[in-house]
Image (cartoon, coloured by chain):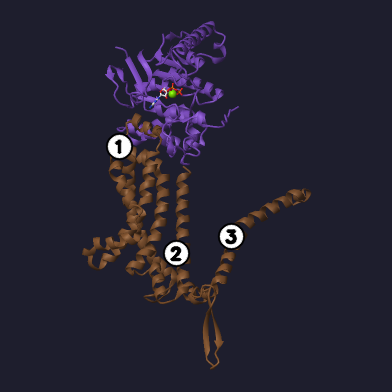
Chain colours: A brown, B purple
Amino acid sequence: MLPLLNCPSINTAAAVKISTDFLTKYILPLLGIFAVLLIWTAVAGGVREEKTASGFTKKIKTGLIQDLPGPYETWVKTKKYIVQPFAKREELDQGILRFTWYSLIVVAKGYSIALIIGTPIGFMLGLSKVFTRMFDPIIQILRPVSPLAWMPLGVVLFMGAGKHANDLGALFTIAVCSMWPTVLNTAVGVRAVPQDYLNVAKVLKLSKWKTLWKVLVPATLPYMFTGYRLSLGIAWLVIVAVEMLTGRIGIGNFLWNEYNNGLYTSIILSILTIGFVGWALDRLMSLLESRFKSI
Amino acid sequence: MSFIEIKDASKGFGSPGNRTEVLRDINLTVERGEFVVIVGYSGSGKSTLINLLSGLVKPDAGTASIEGQVITEPGPDRGLVFQNYSLLPWLTVTENIALAVDEVFKDWSKEKRADHVAKYIAMVKLTPAANKLPKELSGGMRQRVSVARTLAIEPKVLLMDEPLSALDALTRAQLQDEIADIWLKNKTTVIWITNDPDEAILVADRVIPLLPTSPATLGESISVNIPRPRDRKLINHEPEFKRLRAHLITTLLDSKGKNKVKSSRKLSLPDILPEDLNNLHNMEFINRRGPKRRTDNQREEVEVLA
Ligand SMILES: Nc1ncnc2c1ncn2[C@@H]1O[C@H](COP(=O)(O)OP(=O)(O)OP(=O)(O)O)[C@@H](O)[C@H]1O
Ligand SMILES: [Mg+2]
């Protein structure tokens, strides 16, 4: 402690530094959240009770957006989904994370299909000019198609599967929609492999197969993982739409049902949950991605 | 028939209409065990010339051959040390060399190959760094790995494309001595490219200037009859060294003067840089094909090991 006492100026400077760090890291985001809650409260609707002349109590809607529940109301009404996140009371009355879990399983399946199909397509696009010329236009046209448009086709494709048609259609939709970032990033990555590395392979006369696994794949990995991260984001976007359309149990389906039942607080809970899970998935993938970038 | 022969080879790049002829009427013979150095200005076509032998470049006219076989594609019988190291950044020193050894000596046992790799790592004095990634090594160490990788596949000829040009003067001197030592022990045929006349005379049996006419041609070869091992401190005072050096520089300068009359081709300073392995994946080379050039850099730091 003594040396510190001898130079108080450094000591306070350090303290100031720490407190600004603390401010930017924690206080500012909290302020932001607080501000949004405030605006939300301000615009949210409520109910005021009024005694009529005849002695009845009449409920009158108030507020700027009358049907939008405020933060407090949302918390009170959705508490049961949050405090018991994995409870299963009835088919349509389950904890919020249980619904999320159902959705995540479907996403995981569809996303895996996307990667398994998308990565090789990306490699072929990156490696072959002929392949690129042939399929690039089709890819550019299919890429912007909304999941809502793919879903019916998915179900039609698997009509033969009877009662599984919906499930398979859902997987198809997730896979098709989330595949593109993987395809395109992989292709860009393969094209960006420095010629020098390929020359090493040529001089050693590595076989095509060995060149692929020893040179191309490692050199492309960082790009592939960027694609994988973006693809996962899209897969998570798509699941909500898919569940609304098919009625599969899950977070998107929960949101839609509650909307139809007029329980608007659940909509807000669902949105927050979807957002939070999407953010967590993205963090997870960027951790993986940065591991490969550090090579 | 000589061991290595280039006969009347020419090479140009670009499509008709927008074409630059780089090399014309190249004739070169190299005998087994010879140490030949080719000196030339930057951008005059040195890499192109050596790649006629490595097989990465095909001549437009003429032929390049080794042991009477015309060279049509790259192969491990001609070990190429790349101008910019070209180590694979995701592999350690050992793995980089093992990739080459495992491919070339497929029929050896696993242990034999591992021993072989270790032997060459020791030869370039990198045993303590054997398990490091290229990005953890200095420029000189990277170049040693690159040399070891090429020596380890025991090629019939070593093709060295400016192996030391990207290094600082002190490291360069040290590596010149080390490589000359290794050569004295192995006596493999070496064709070494450089832009430094002193380096050329210090290491070579025979120096051939690549004259920067447009397109470039090879000049008269100059034999260096200075006994080995050559001591870089003493050699500076040797009359023979001084004479050869003056002769070589005059040859190069004279033909450059001629070149000025004939064409207005611009010659630039040494321009190629090794890949920066620290930020390899920052999308920088997405719009780039081929090596990084010094002219791309706004600022440059050169580290000198004291
Ligand atoms: N693949 C290529 N396509 C088009 N032009 C090329 C190609 N390779 C080389 N050139 C041109 O040929 C000329 C000679 O290039 P080369 O790399 O052989 O020179 P160099 O003597 O090795 O130069 P440096 O000292 O910079 O390595 C240059 O003008 C270069 O622009
Ligand atoms: Mg060169």
Which residue is tagged 2?
A274
Q: Quadrant of residue B217?
A: top left
Using the rendered image of the protein, determine whether residue B155 is visible from the camera's viewpoint: no
The residue at the point 48 percent across, 55 percent down is A283
Q: Which comes sooner in the sequence, label 2 or label 1? A: 1
Q: Which amino acid does label 3 sit on?
A: Pro
Name the one closer to the observer, A184 or A60.
A60
The residue at the point 39 percent across, 75 percent down is A260
Q: Which chain carries label 1?
A: A
Seen in the image, is A154 located left or right of residue A15?
left
Q: What residue type is labelled 1?
A: Lys
Which numbered marker is on residue A208? 1
| The furthest residue to the bottom | A54
Does the residue tagged 2 have its C-beta within 8 Å of any atom of ligand 1? no
Which numbered marker is on residue B86? none
The residues bearing labels 2 and 3 have C-alpha atoms spaced at a distance of 20 Å
How many numbered discs, if any?
A: 3
Q: Say above or below: A142 vs A194.
A: below
Disc 2 secondary structure class: helix
Spot occupied by residue A99 in the image (x, y as percentages of width and height)? 40, 69
Q: Quadrant of residue B26?
A: top left
Q: State whether discs 2 and 1 lie on one chain.
A: yes
